[in-house]
Image (cartoon, coloured by chain):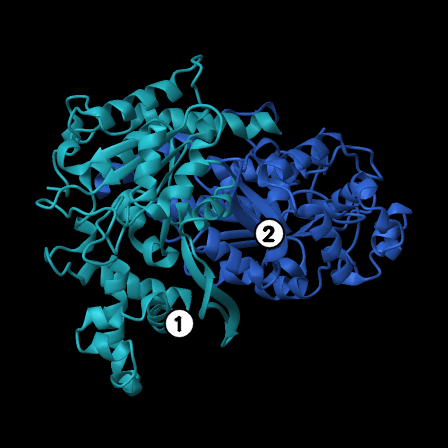
Chain colours: A cyan, B blue
């Protein structure tokens, strides 16, 4: 029973290494051309060499090469607000005609006036209310279409670029480099799982089944003899902080050997990953580049990086200084 | 961004087809040697031919070739009781010294007396009580070890075989055949997700991240400076009936094109799978072989097959008559 299937998996992954097409950018045999030759790049390359060298003490079998990535602030930008919050505001504007009561009702009234600050004054409770009003009540198929349509048309308020162009080129290279070395790459994000799935395969090469995120409850129903899944206005799972290792266990069922994040929301994921035996890798993206991107950490209302930075420094995790370690930030 | 990663996935899967080693049993180019040349085999082969032929109307791109399998009664046997229930009884016996009160307390007292019928007289409530008493309170790492130890030592009460030898040889061939044609194979079972994960890769070639099942809640904690995930005595998700399409959406995030089951618990999964556009395949294993396995359907207390059989007949789903369609049932 064993021998029938195992060799296929191994060969598949070996084939990936052998046949991975070489993009123009790494023609010079550099898998990470957008990274300066500073400590983070050297540490990544050394880790990959260590876990892929058969017979070495750090060798990790192909099937156990699991890498997890936070999304907001790690794979794409998250300023001035999580992009999903901007999606929520856009949806409130689209849905407003069906909700005349929103004109008088906070936090919706502030969103409709374009007053983001007041809209968010109600904190997590207000945000959750807006998420439920915009992310539930439709089928999963309908929601997927809403997200798919939004992601190709919406523009970032500061740069005017589509959000999928505000992904980090060095991280795209890192994803490809890991996969070329037999890693299975997963997203583990506080963001909505169904907000990411419609585009992560196209943008990151990460298929829907390798996306872990927050979710609302979903209910199976028959409508006119056809089965549908209806999104309910009730939180199912919050994939942040202590939730991230739980999300990893639920979806992946084994401990990753490498984890990539940028905020205190990723701390427990990095703790969980590095607490396993054998070779382990943890990396934090530190946003230090106010010119090419944004500079923020301990005091930020979005992507706060405080405790995780201290722990990263203490425990020798790799910390990317965006300004000094990345040649370019966004693609092109 | 797209071009960097997509070709790798495609090549990986193509390579799997090209390089999949040919087991001795299918030397004669028959991928399903344990299947008689009756309708089910012909329908499977025709479906695979249809979805893999580029340019044909039924062609399905590699990344969308998702197949889902129920476990109990579909991949391995489930009589006289779900094997996980036998695991529960064994755990109760092991844990009894730490629970002197169980001697007087139902349903535990009956289990300890070996009276399974009385133990199960309390129905779902009693079963859930026993599951929580035996599946919670320990860390995920500890539970994995408990299952791993049990699965290699426990024996089936009737056949005396290890449970992992009571898997269906024709279904093992089917799993391998699908994978050789670029399918990603998932388990979607009412059984416990962490009861299956420790052995599904070895037995079925299905890695932990492709196993969907029922679960208890899990909590992240730091113990002596080390992170652990502690299993809580509270149901998190019940992956049966209406739950199966929900589990599929949560874990896979796209609709399968092929689904395999054997009971009314699989009905909604087959409905959900076949309601998608394009080529679809649904199969029910009908247990008709009292001699080599068991014969049961509409009246069975385990794996009841009633509504799903009617709907399968009406809608033209493939129904395997185990006695007539399978040359052998178990391996060897």
Label drawn at residue B215: 2
Callout 2 secondary element: strand
Disc 1 designates what residue? A138
Mark 1 vs mark 2, CA separation in Å: 26 Å
Q: Residue B83 in the image: x percent, y percent?
A: 74, 44
Quarter of the figure with the N terminus of chain B: top left
Q: Residue at x 11, y 58 (%)?
A: A158
Chain of the residue on which disc 1 is drawn: A
Which of A266 and B41 lies nearest the eye of the viewer?
A: A266
Quarter of the figure with the C terminus of chain B: top right
Label drawn at residue A214: none
Which of A9 and B25 lies nearest the eye of the viewer?
A: A9
Q: Residue B280 in the image: x percent, y percent?
A: 48, 55
Up-down relation of residue B205 to residue B253 (above or below): above
Horizontal arrangement in the rendering, residue B62 relative to residue A290 (left or right): right
Callout 1 secondary element: loop
Q: Residue B88 in the image: x percent, y percent?
A: 75, 46
């Amino acid at each position: 029973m064993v021998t029938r299937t195992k060799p296929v998996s191994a060969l598949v992954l070996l084939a990936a290494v052998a046949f991975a097409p070489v993009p123009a950018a790494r023609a010079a045999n550099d898998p990470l051309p957008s990274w300066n030759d500073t400590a983070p790049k050297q540490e990544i390359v050394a880790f990959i060499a260590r876990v892929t060298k058969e017979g070495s003490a750090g060798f990790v079998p192909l099937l156990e090469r699991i890498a997890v990535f936070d999304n907001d602030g790690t794979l794409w930008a998250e300023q001035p607000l999580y992009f999903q919050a901007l999606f929520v505001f856009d949806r409130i504007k689209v849905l407003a005609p069906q909700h005349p009561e929103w004109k008088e009702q906070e936090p919706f009234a502030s969103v409709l006036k374009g007053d983001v600050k007041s809209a968010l004054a109600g904190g997590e409770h207000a945000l959750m209310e807006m998420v439920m009003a915009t992310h539930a009540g439709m089928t999963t198929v309908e929601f997927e279409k809403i997200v798919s349509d939004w992601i190709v048309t919406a523009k970032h308020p500061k740069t005017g670029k589509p959000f999928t162009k505000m992904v980090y080129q060095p991280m795209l290279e890192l994803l490809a480099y890991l996969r070329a070395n037999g890693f299975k790459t997963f997203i583990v994000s506080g963001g909505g799982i169904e907000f990411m799935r419609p585009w992560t395969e196209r943008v990151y090469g990460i298929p829907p089944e390798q996306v872990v995120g927050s979710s609302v409850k979903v209910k199976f129903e028959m409508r006119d003899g056809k089965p549908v899944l209806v999104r309910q206005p009730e939180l199912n799972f919050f994939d942040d902080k202590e939730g991230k290792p739980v999300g990893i266990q639920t979806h992946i069922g084994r401990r990753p050997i490498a984890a990539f994040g940028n905020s205190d929301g990723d701390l427990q994921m990095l703790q969980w990953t590095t607490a396993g035996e054998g070779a382990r890798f943890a990396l934090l993206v530190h946003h230090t580049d106010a010119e090419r991107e944004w500079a923020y950490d301990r005091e930020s209302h979005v992507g706060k990086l405080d405790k995780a930075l201290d722990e990263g420094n203490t425990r020798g995790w790799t910390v990317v200084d965006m300004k000094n370690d990345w040649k370019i930030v966004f693609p092109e």
